Amino acid sequence: MAQILDPLPPEQSGKILCCYINATSKIQVARISNIPNWYFERVVFPGQRLVFEAPEKGQMEIHTGMMASAILSDNIPCDRLMLDEPSTDEFDTDSSDEKDPFNTKPMLQQLNTKTEDTTKPLQVASLASVD
């Protein structure tokens, strides 16, 4: 995933794909400030998922916003936010003999197809007058 606005400095090695989810009901600001020559700051709305690339040594600061201020509410190492990237072997389409790990369940379930007559006469309830 390329970051157009602020790519990682070329001298940075070991970049990882990360994900942070704002599980609060408040707006947050996610900031990585411990990497020299790199600026990363994003607004994360409640329930929003932020996917980004960062150096392994990055420390994400989470600032929770109030009306006119924000407090530092968390400091998370980026390696704890790392996503598991699938290996290229999992997407190998040339091996048709192997079992597909993604399609283990059938897409459609078998319908119950009874061939016997399932129609029954309708029974109508009636009211009787009582004196």
Image: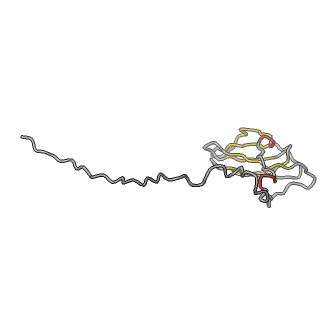
- 34 left or right of 11 in image: left
Residue at left offset 63%, top offset 42%: 24
Observer-nearest of 39 and 20: 20
Whether 77 is drawn above or below 16: the answer is above
The residue furthest right is: 11
Q: How many marks?
A: 0
Residue at left offset 56%, top offset 54%: 108
Where does the N terminus fall, quadrant-wise?
bottom right
The residue furthest bottom is: 4
Observer-nearest of 53 and 66: 53
- 25 left or right of 15 in image: left
Whether 2 is drawn above or below 23: the answer is below
Q: Position of residue 113 (x, y in %)?
A: 46, 54
The residue furthest front is: 116
Observer-nearest of 88 and 57: 88
Colour pattern of the rendering: secondary structure
Residue at left offset 33%, top offset 54%: 119
Where does the C terminus fall, quadrant-wise?
top left
Q: Position of residue 31 (x, y in %)?
A: 77, 47
Q: Which corner quadrant of the image does residue 94 belong to?
A: bottom right
Q: Position of residue 30 (x, y in %)?
A: 74, 47
